Image (tube, rainbow, N blue to C red):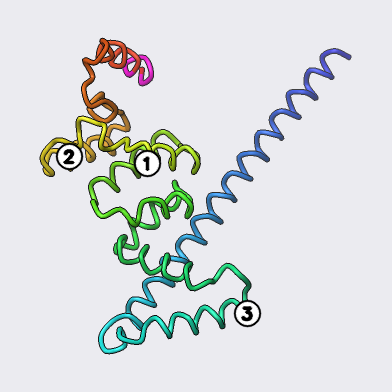
Amino acid sequence: MKNELSQDSAILNDVKTLIEQSRQQVAIAVNATITMLYWQVGKRINEEILGGQRADHGKSVIQGLSDQLTMDYGRGWSKKHLWHCVKFAQVFDDKEIVYTVCRQLSWSHLRLVFYMDDPLKREFYIEICKLEKWSVRTFRERIKSMLYERTAISKKPDETIKKDLQNLRDTQQITPDLVFRDPYFLGLKDVYSERLKLSYQ
């Protein structure tokens, strides 16, 4: 009897794991599809409404578009949201990059970074968020705390920052420069370096 209960429990746990994995995969796929939709909408508005001779009356056209979409599909298509889509497509102009990023970060995550003027700062936050798997709330708090400005990497030349971020993408490992302005502060360098070694063994 105990063996049967134990076996049933194991099966139950396995099935629950399969269900949770499937739910997570569905959530990722839905998020990626919605985020790609927003990018395509923004790209189309950029090309067809804001580009060329039509740019002068783009605002009124977008307002009309918002009114019609809201009537057909609900409140999710406000004028403000359409402008978010526009900015998204302007900042991320490579479809393949967008597709990759939106399978790891939600629309709510991305909306926090695409108004940043500094592309290296934006890339820093995206890469760290992907690696650390921050919630939207945590991500917002890290940005508000000026995490990037407090790191050693932010004081380096642009080319060095690009190399460091590429290294982060390739190795998926955070270095002290990406976290502390002065890793020797209070002896944190040795402590943090040791934690990094343990984390990635």
Q: Nearer the viewer, mark 1 or mark 3?
A: 1
Disc 3 residue type (three-letter): Asp
User: Which residue is pictured at 10% across the width and 40% down the height?
Assistant: 157
Pointer 2 local density, CA inside 10 Å: few below 14, some 14–19, many at least 20: many
Q: Which stretch is magenta? A: 196-200
Residue shown at the point (82%, 14%) measured from the top left = 3
Query: How far separated are the C-alphas under marks 3 and 2?
Result: 46 Å
Lateral position of residue 120 relative to residue 128, left or right:
left
**Residues at marks 1 and 3, CA–CA distance in whole angstroms:** 36 Å
Relative to 196, does residue 140 appear above or below in the rendering?
Answer: below
- Extreme right residue here? 1
Q: Please report the residue visible at 39 percent of the width from the left and 77 percent of the height from the top.
A: 45
Between 48 and 103, the residue placed more toward the observer is 48
User: Between disc 3 and disc 2, whose residue precedes?
Assistant: 3
Q: Quadrant of residue 156?
A: top left
Up-down relation of residue 34 to residue 26 (above or below): below
- Say the numbered circle drawn on residue 72: 3
Give the amino acid type for the residue marked by disc 2 in the picture.
Ile
The residue identified by callout 2 is 161
Residue under numbered circle 1 = 143
